[in-house]
């Protein structure tokens, strides 16, 4: 029914209301997404097309952070992949949200970008809704969240005012001149009072931060652990990276990353088997509607789809329960893989949802995940502690890689470092 549901107007189905409900917007301060899609417009119309301009700096920031977070020795050492990777991804997201100037040498702002998610008061989902506004104050996470919002506002509000002032002075209407980051574009493109309000902009930036850093981190951790559990796939992907690296003399641009079909296939396979959430395509019904098969949707109902309905359908995926990292590029499927890259909307997997509410962060994810994975897989070796694969953790419908999970990592012997240009 996805195609038909995609065709329904916003007056019938609404996705943002279900996100706000599911992620406790009324308790976390992120409820403003019910009223505006400004952040989505900015991500889709301005930031995603400008990603080539952020590429080299994103690569440099992630690379520096990898060197700080992962061992610099050829001896095996214990690491917590989620904790290391979230710092690297935090660098990429902070850069896209706040720009190069604000984030340079500003670890507090970069940390805020991922710490925000730690403080979403998930425990309240187990409490009746009428008690939530009272009981939430008993959670330390609520107090940390308030402090996080205060710090974020302390960064965003002055920056918004400064950008407004500088835009006024230079009368700079040419968007290509502006910094390719979310705040700069928001200030430039705000069309009404709400879209120009610095507090609203803070909330939108915070909501993007909360929804993005751990999604990418969990995904990257899963791609790595799936490959470590399947050494043949790991070997094929690392050989592909090594060969490309030799061909381009270690100087990676966006086109070289996009040419890695084995890596791309492994990314798709991990997201097929371990999506971020078991429930995808969640919508709230805003007005009664009868679908073409006679099913009646009633105002106030929730619509959602089990992610495994199609990802585990043997008519679509052969041996659907099995991890086959190269399934998307095997047996002449390379052309298909190219036509349907990881970042595209795929109604078989619904990794990014579908239709007008699909994920506007998919190109940012694709770029930062590939930078991180190529650098880590090329320069490091990973292994499970005592050979024990790591389980997938779940909290309600959300699947994640536990932040305390440990693995072994070491620098590869005699490997040359790679650079992003
Ligand atoms: C592995 C990483 C990610 C995954 C798997 C993912 C997945 C999703 C999914 C499934 C949806 C709901 C789509 C629907 O219901 O049709 C969504 C929405 C959204 N995502 Fe992502 N996402 C990821 C990363 C990001 C990033 C990096 C950003 C921002 C930089 C982002 C921003 C958003 C926003 C703002 C929405 C709400 C869209 C709306 O309300 O119209 N996501 N994402």
Image (spheres, helix red, strand yellow):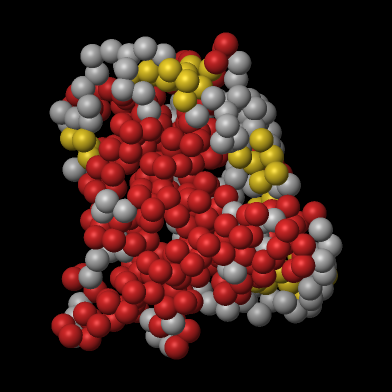
Task: Give x and y (percent) for residue 171.
Answer: 18, 85
The foreground one among 143 and 193 is 143
| Residue at the outermost bottom position | 193
Q: For the image shown, how many numbered marks are present on the structure? A: 0
The foreground one among 234 and 221 is 221
Location of the N terminus by quadrant is bottom right
Task: Give x and y (percent) for residue 329.
Answer: 44, 30
In this image, 9 relative to 293: left or right?
Answer: left
Residue depicted at x 44% and y 54%: 113
Relative to residue 16, is residue 58 depicted above or below?
above
Question: Visible in this render: residue 410?
Answer: yes
Residue depicted at x 23% and y 30%: 418
Residue depicted at x 71% and y 47%: 397
The image quadrant of residue 237 is top left
Residue depicted at x 64% and y 32%: 392
The foreground one among 57 and 341 is 57
Location of the C terminus by quadrant is top left
Task: Give x and y (percent) for residue 413.
Answer: 28, 13
Question: Visible in this render: residue 304?
Answer: no
The foreground one among 264 and 161 is 161
Relative to residue 192, is residue 421 depicted above or below?
above
In this image, 384 relative to 43: left or right?
Answer: right
Task: Give x and y (percent) for residue 304.
Answer: 72, 57
In this image, 2 relative to 42: left or right?
Answer: right
């Amino acid at each position: 029914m996805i195609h038909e549901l995609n065709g329904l107007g916003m007056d019938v189905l609404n996705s943002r209301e279900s996100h706000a409900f599911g992620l406790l917007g009324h308790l976390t301060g992120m409820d403003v997404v019910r009223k505006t899609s400004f952040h989505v417009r900015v991500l889709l119309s301005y930031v995603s097309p400008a990603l080539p301009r952020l590429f080299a700096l994103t690569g440099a920031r992630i690379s520096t952070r990898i060197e700080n977070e992962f061992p610099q020795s050829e001896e095996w050492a214990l690491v917590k992949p989620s904790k290391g990777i979230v710092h690297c991804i935090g660098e990429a997201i902070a850069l896209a949200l706040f720009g190069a100037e604000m984030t340079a040498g500003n670890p507090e702002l970069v940390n805020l970008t991922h710490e925000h998610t730690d403080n979403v008061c998930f425990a309240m989902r187990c409490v009746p809704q009428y008690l939530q506004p009272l009981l939430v104050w008993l959670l330390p996470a609520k107090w940390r969240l308030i402090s996080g919002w205060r710090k974020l506002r302390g960064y965003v509000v002055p920056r918004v005012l400064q950008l407004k002032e500088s835009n006024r002075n230079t009368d700079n209407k040419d968007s290509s001149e502006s910094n390719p980051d979310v705040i700069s574009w928001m200030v430039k493109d705000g069309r009404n009072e709400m879209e120009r309000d610095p507090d609203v902009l803070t909330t939108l930036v915070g909501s993007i931060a909360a929804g993005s850093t751990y999604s990418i981190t969990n995904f990257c951790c899963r791609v790595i652990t799936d490959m470590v559990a399947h050494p043949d796939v790991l070997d094929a992907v690392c050989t592909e990276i090594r060969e490309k690296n030799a061909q381009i003399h270690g100087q990676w641009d966006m086109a070289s990353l996009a040419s890695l079909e084995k890596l791309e296939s492994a990314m798709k396979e991990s997201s097929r088997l371990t999506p971020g959430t078991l429930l995808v395509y969640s919508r709230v019904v805003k007005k009664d509607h009868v679908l073409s098969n006679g099913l009646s949707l009633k105002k106030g109902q929730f619509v959602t789809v089990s992610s495994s309905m199609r990802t585990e359908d043997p008519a679509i995926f052969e041996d659907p329960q099995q991890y086959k990292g190269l399934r998307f590029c095997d047996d002449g499927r390379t052309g298909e893989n190219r036509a349907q890259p990881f970042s595209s909307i795929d109604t078989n997997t619904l990794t990014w949802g579908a239709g007008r509410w699909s994920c506007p962060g998919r190109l940012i994810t694709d770029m930062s995940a590939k930078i991180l994975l190529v650098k880590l897989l090329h320069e490091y070796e990973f292994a499970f502690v005592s050979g024990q694969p790591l389980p997938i953790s779940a909290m309600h419908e959300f699947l994640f890689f536990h932040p305390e999970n440990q693995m072994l990592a070491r620098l590869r012997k005699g490997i040359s470092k790679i650079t992003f240009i």
